Image: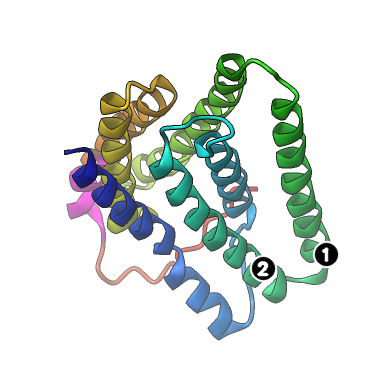
Amino acid sequence: MVLLIFVSGNIFAFGLFVSPVPTFRRIVRNRSTEQFSGLPYIYALLNCLITLWYGTPLISLDNVMVMTVNSIGAIFQLVYIILFIVYTENSTKVRMLGFLLAVFTLFAIVAGVSLQIIDPWIRRNVVGLLSCGSLISMFASPLFIINLVIQTKSIEYMPFYLSLSTFLMSTSFFLYGIFNFDPFVYVPNGIGTVLGIVQLAVYFYYKNSATEDSKEPLIISYE
């Protein structure tokens, strides 16, 4: 059962990580980031790095799935950020590079300070709380999109497969955390599962309101 959850969790996470590919195809094709924001990928990279660190044997001995999935996620987010920097305007390049440097600096501080904690149980709890908080903030970020969908009564800004991948991945990790008796995994992913259900419910509720001939570009800025 745990093996099945491990495999499905990795598959669903991969689906979530590749979901921005159409956006970056557009960016590369147009050689411009237009009004897209790079901040979601900065947040995602920081989240992947902190959660990856929590999954390493230096912090917790029984979270291989957490470590492997977030390692892959960190690579994807870094590639997206590099592409964004390449095709964005010069003023934004400087800011994005500053954010990227801040992410690696913050991660280095977290890793360095946690390694100074001698007691393994305290070290795991400290990093686990940071990872838990990071995951909850990531899962809560789509609330902005849900609010936008409700206001516009259109699902144009809520890609179905992104919502579905988020729900499936959260559910897989929620079950993994339950079987692994790890509250730092099942609590945030339990919240992610609930929010995923809300996203899907909103999507299907407003599905009939989406107009097929809408010409408005799918451009959302989180800045």
Q: Amino acid at mark 1?
A: Ser
Is 206 colored magenta in this rendering?
A: yes
For residue 82, which numbered disc appears in the image? 2
Q: Is residue 195 left or right of residue 99?
A: left
Q: Is residue 34 above or below residue 17?
A: below
Residue at figure coordinates x 33%, y 21% from the top left: 181
Q: Main secondary structure of the magenta part?
A: helix
Residue behind mark 1: 91
SS assignment at label 1:
helix
Q: Is residue 120 left or right of residue 64?
A: right
Is any part of residue 154 visible from this angle?
Answer: no
Residue 37 in percent (x, y) is at: 61, 57
Residue at figure coordinates x 38%, y 44% from the top left: 65
Where residue 29 sits, quadrant-wise, is: bottom right
Bounds of the magenta segment? 202-210
Name the quadrant of the N terminus.
Answer: top left
Q: Amino acid at mark 2?
A: Ile
Q: Nearer the viewer, residue 56 or 154?
A: 56
Tell me the distance, in whole angstroms, between the alpha carbons under discs 1 and 2. Answer: 15 Å
